[in-house]
Image: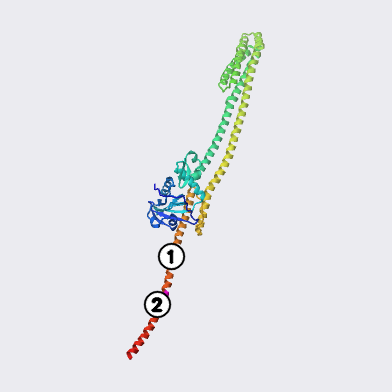
Amino acid sequence: MRINMPITDREIMLDDDTCIVSRTDIKGRINFINDDFVRISGFQEEELLGAPHNIVRHPDMPPEAYADLWKTLGEGKPWIGLVKNRCKNGDYYWVEAHASPIRDGDRVIGYMSVRTKPGRDKVMAAENLYRLFREGKQGNLTIREGQAVRTGILANLFKVQYLNIKWRLILVFSFFGACLMFGGALGLYGMKQSNQGLKSVYEDRSIPMGQLAEIQRLLLQNRRLVETSISGTPETVRNNTSEVEKNIGQVSLMWDEYMTTGLQPEDQSLAEKFAADRARYVNEGLKPAISTLRANLPGEARSAAVERIAALYQEAESDIDALIKRQIMVSKAEYESAQANYKSIRDLALYSIALTLLLSASIGYFLIRSIMRPIDQATKLANAVASGDLTTQVGHTSRSEIGRLLLTLKIMNLNLVALVGDVRGSTDSITTASQEIAAGNSDLSQRTEEQASSLEETASSMEQLTSTVRQNAEN
């Protein structure tokens, strides 16, 4: 990198209306400069034309800034940034440089740079930034398109403002799509939970409760069949005892089915107690009573029915009642749990809807603002240029398509300012030359008149001389 020396600590302050213009070829060699460039830099015009543009580079400028400049111009984009330049005598001056490619059709044939006076706040920020780069303390800072930006994962989270309009719209619609998917998933999850709750109530509570109720009915029916058979006929005894044996088998089958349902530990404990009490009710009560009835021993059967069956039945019925109450209690608990889940899902859905509406309004506001604000600035600048006002200044913080359009309009405005300045300078030169020519013509006219007067006097003298000569000849 070229290092221009010597340097001093004296800063040259630009005037507000100073506009430094230069043009270079694609190799960076200067082929045009305006008077402000010559006046500020301290170089002669012949020293600058044909020289590389880095002849005014100041050693304090970091290489990263110029690398970013040429990278941006190489991509066909304009570049705006603060630059510290060096005068011929070592003094320095700060400029806000606006560089852009010069095209002939689709071909870049050179570059144009227009420099204006920057604000002091920008100068202080640029001095601090460039010092960090010179000292190698820039950290995750880098220079892109003339602006300092941060790199890294955390910095990428804040790059939405630099996205172009296409990606902003993609992100917005993706956000709304994600919200829609989340709402749909939440609804499906709630439906699934409700379905599982209904399924659990039906399979694990309603069916087992029906089975328990049927078992309870058959237990009571067996007791009554035995009691009815004590004073019945042989045919009644035969039919009733067969019915009791059939009911015992049905109860066993239903009990086996009940044990396959989802039993909790407390249900399991009650089920084991009922199974033991029912076995005693069958083996110690019903079966001995059936044997005595078939043996035609009604007295012993009555004793068994009164003393054993009634007591054993009461224990089994107490167990089955406890199981039924347990089913009702668990059903209630599951219902309350389902109600709690419903309220949680409902509250989550309401909060999600409110948050989505708030985020949608915020994103919509900032999206519209990020699009319309640069458009308004571009319209303002275009109207000002159309009306002949080239003094309007606008910012260019956005890197979207509209931001690049605004940047292009700003550079176009500055190029027009430079062009008008060149035309004004040329006009002033032509005016001065015209005035000098007019003065010369006036002087020439005056001398011509004086010469004509002298010629008239000479002619008069010649006539007198001729008359004298004629007289002399006659004499």
* Residue position for label 1: 430
Binning the other alpha carbons within 10 Å of mark 2 as few (below 14), some (14 to 19) or many (20 upward) gives few
Q: Residue furthest left?
A: 473
How busy is the neighbourhood of tag 1: few (under 14 within 10 Å), some, or many (20 plus)?
A: few
Left or right of 205, for residue 2: left
Give x and y (percent) for residue 228.
Answer: 66, 14
Is 16 above or below relative to 289? below
Q: Is residue 55 magenta?
A: no
**Residue 411 position in % (x across, y down):** 46, 53
Of 346 and 447, nearer the camera is 447
Task: Considering the whole magenta stretch, tell me its main secondary structure.
Answer: helix
Compared to residue 259, the image places residue 447 above or below, namely below
Q: CA distance from mark 2 to mark 1?
A: 31 Å
Residue located beneath label 2 in the image: 451
- 306 lies left or right of 67: right
**Image: magenta residue range:** 445-453
Q: Nearer the viewer, residue 421 or 169?
A: 421
Residue lying farthest bottom? 475
- How many marks on residues? 2
| Residue at 42 percent of width and 69 percent of height | 437
Q: Position of residue 276 (x, y in %)?
A: 60, 14
Give coordinates of residue 225: x percent, y percent.
64, 15
Q: Nearer the viewer, residue 270 or 348?
A: 348
Q: Amino acid at mark 2?
A: Gln
